[in-house]
Amino acid sequence: MKQRCSWCGSDPLYRDYHDREWGVPVHEDQKLFEMLILEGAQAGLSWLTILNKRENYRQAFDLFDIVKIARYSSDDVQRLMQNAGIVRNRLKIEAVIKNARGAIAIQDRFGSLAAYFWNYVDHQARQNRWQRTEEIPSSTAESEKMGKDLKNRGFNFVGSTICYAFMQATGMVNDHITECFRYQEILTFNRSQD
């Protein structure tokens, strides 16, 4: 039986996310934007709740097309508030639109979201060596800096903890515990990219 990080429990969807996605480096802007939005949607909720709604989010938000979302109006906010498939929190919905507009400004300034976000880890995934889940921090100096800068650029739902969860999810840091079968797989993958 495979050893996994304890946080993914026994739910098949959670395990699949852990086994296939969490910690794999992401460099595509649309996927980075999606993960930032979903991490923000999680605030106050469980990640499993958001995973269960992820396909609904993709449909509701035009597959996370940044340009389309940036053009959303108050009518779109009203439409989304009626969508039971997503978290119907007005502030979170409005944040998606605000963050899309901010993402376009970052792309204009830095060339891509990937260039901007990966700069926080010097464009190389960090390889941590946690032996127990309890050792893993909920935020770091880098996530604090990222959150502050994003807020200064007009983003919402981008606190230090959300930013660190985003960094973990998108592989900027490898926070699988060392006993987890994915730790070595991701470590090997990252070394092959150097």
Image (cartoon, rainbow, N blue to C red):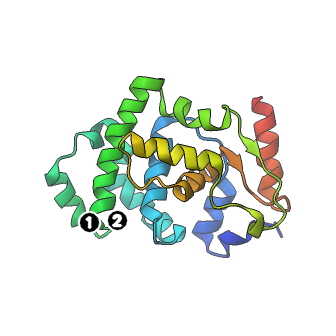
**Tag 1's secondary structure?**
loop
Residue 56 versus residue 186 in the image, above or below: below
Residue at 75 percent of width and 69 percent of height: 134
Image quarter (top left, top right, bottom left or bottom right) of the N terminus = bottom right
Q: Is residue 50 above or below residue 144?
A: below
Taking the spot 48% from the left edge, 28% from the top edge, the residue there is 112
Residue 63 image position (x, y, % from top left): 37, 46
Amino acid carrying mark 1 in the image: Asn
Residue 25 image-quadrant placement: top right
Is 121 left, or right, of 186 in this rendering? left
Q: Nearer the viewer, residue 35 or 162?
A: 162
- Residue situated furthest left in the rendering: 75
Q: Give the residue displayed 66% in from the left and 69% down from the top.
A: 8
Q: Are marks 1 and 2 in contact (CB under 8 Å)?
A: yes
| Amino acid bearing label 2 | Ile
Q: Seen in the image, is 30 located left or right of residue 6?
A: left
| Residue 193 visible to an observer of this rendering | yes
Residue hosting label 2: 86
Whether residue 170 is visible here, answered yes or no, is: no
Residue 13 place in picture, x, y as percent? 58, 67
Q: Residues within 10 Å of mark 2 (few under 14, many from 20)?
A: many
Q: Residue at x 59, y 53 (%)?
A: 164
Numbered label tally: 2
The label on residue 66 is none
Look at mark 1 in the image and give the residue it sits on.
83
